[in-house]
Image (cartoon, grey):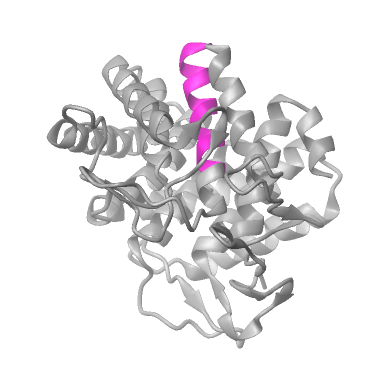
């Protein structure tokens, strides 16, 4: 059916069921793996299962369910804005990179049905996730006019948020940094590239530079902790650090590299992957046996290995391996 949301250490906790958030991540990871290893039948199975789950999750109005029980019953009337945004991201990624024509066509149909929902998502991260998918969709189908209109609106919303909040010693989209932070500048950079919008690219690069100045210390990535976040004018939380932050750093650095060609961004992407391997503020290993611990606390690692964490680790690994094959050897 899909990936179980949570685990007790490395044992899946079936009572937590499934969610569209994680299945969307799993589809991207499986397709990424197939780009590197086209004959990987396990990755093919995960991709097929994940796309089938997303198809079942989509409602007639284009939105998606999020939570499903282990008994395969939907537990909500409609999913969260973030889960819908992530589903759109996965579909756009599939439109561009899925190895089968049938998968790409199905992704396109589902994404087109979801387009009217995007303005209602209402949150910058939800829009950013959708924007990343739309950018991929437009790379695959440049004359997809409705997707271009939707992405232009998302880029406008991100620019407006940046202009409303940035100021002295604060080049950011909001008055605080919370979760999955690097996705915001990444989405603006990717949108700017596909829309040929230099203003969006420049603004995304400025925001990303500020984020890096806050979170990279002497070449070590120290993501914003979830125990308090980072409120403007306050002190940033250092723990608990979440694996999805490191993956977002990797992808945002690759977006910045693609926009500028500056090799410093390629090096920064490696800093993000190295966080999983102990180059972090506690010098502790997060990646183990193909999985990933759920976070880094001041006292040590969270020994649980939920789907989000393991998929974040695999996504970062495959993102690097697509550009630097040695990264995949390290991950093994």
Please provide the residue range marked out in magenta: 247-261
Residue drawn at x 56%, y 62% as measured from the top left: 22
Q: Position of residue 104 (x, y in %)?
A: 59, 44
Relative horizontal placement of residue 149, taking residue 241 as reference (left or right): left
Relative horizontal placement of residue 27, taking residue 321 as reference (left or right): left
Is residue 102 shown to the viewer in this render? no
Residue drawn at x 34%, y 28% as measured from the top left: 210
Vertical placement of 108 versus 84: above or below?
A: above
- Most common SS among magenta residues: helix
Q: Is residue 158 or residue 228 the one in the foreground?
A: 228
Q: Classify residue 32 by image quadrant.
A: top right
The quadrant in which the N terminus is found is bottom right
Q: Is residue 63 or residue 207 the one in the foreground?
A: 207
The quadrant in which the C terminus is found is top right
Q: Position of residue 175 (x, y in %)?
A: 20, 45
Relative horizontal placement of residue 75, taking residue 250 as reference (left or right): left
Vertical placement of 143 versus 297: above or below?
A: above
Is residue 142 shown to the viewer in this render? yes
**Is-magenta flag for residue 256?**
yes
Q: Is residue 34 or residue 243 the one in the foreground?
A: 243
Q: Position of residue 49 (x, y in %)?
A: 68, 64
Residue drawn at x 49%, y 69% as measured from the top left: 57
Q: Classify residue 269 by image quadrant.
A: top right
Q: Classify residue 6 by image quadrant.
A: bottom right
Residue drawn at x 57%, y 81% as measured from the top left: 16
Vertical placement of 194 versus 314: above or below?
A: above
Q: How many marks?
A: 0
């Amino acid at each position: 059916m899909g990936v179980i949301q949570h685990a007790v250490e490395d044992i899946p906790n079936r009572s937590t069921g499934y969610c569209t958030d994680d299945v969307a991540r799993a589809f991207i990871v499986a397709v990424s793996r197939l780009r590197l290893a086209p004959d990987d039948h396990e990755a093919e199975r995960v991709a097929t299962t994940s796309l089938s789950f997303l198809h079942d999750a989509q409602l007639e109005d284009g939105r998606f369910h999020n939570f499903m029980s282990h008994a395969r019953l939907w537990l909500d009337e409609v999913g969260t804005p973030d889960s819908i945004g992530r589903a759109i991201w996965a579909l756009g990624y599939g439109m561009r990179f899925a190895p089968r024509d049938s998968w790409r066509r199905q992704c396109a149909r589902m994404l087109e049905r979801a387009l009217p929902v995007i303005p209602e998502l209402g949150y910058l991260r939800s829009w950013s996730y959708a924007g990343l998918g739309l950018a991929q969709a437009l790379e695959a189908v440049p004359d997809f006019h409705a997707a271009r209109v939707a992405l232009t609106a998302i880029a406008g919303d991100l620019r407006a948020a940046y202009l409303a909040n940035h100021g002295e010693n604060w080049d950011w989209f909001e008055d605080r940094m919370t979760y999955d932070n690097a996705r915001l500048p990444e989405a603006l950079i990717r949108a700017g590239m596909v829309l040929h919008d230099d203003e969006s690219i420049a603004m995304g690069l400025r925001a990303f530079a500020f984020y890096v100045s806050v979170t990279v210390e002497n070449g070590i990535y120290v993501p914003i902790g979830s125990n308090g976040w980072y409120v403007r004018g306050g002190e940033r939380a250092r723990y608990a650090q979440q694996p999805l932050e490191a993956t977002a750093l990797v992808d945002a650095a690759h977006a910045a590299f693609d926009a500028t060609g500056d090799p410093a961004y390629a090096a920064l992407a490696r800093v993000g992957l190295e966080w999983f391997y102990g180059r972090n503020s506690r010098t502790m290993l997060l990646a183990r046996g193909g999985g990933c611990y759920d976070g880094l606390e001041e006292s040590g690692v969270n020994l649980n290995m939920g789907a989000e964490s393991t998929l974040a680790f695999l996504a970062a690994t495959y993102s690097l391996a697509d550009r630097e094959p040695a990264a995949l050897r390290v991950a093994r």
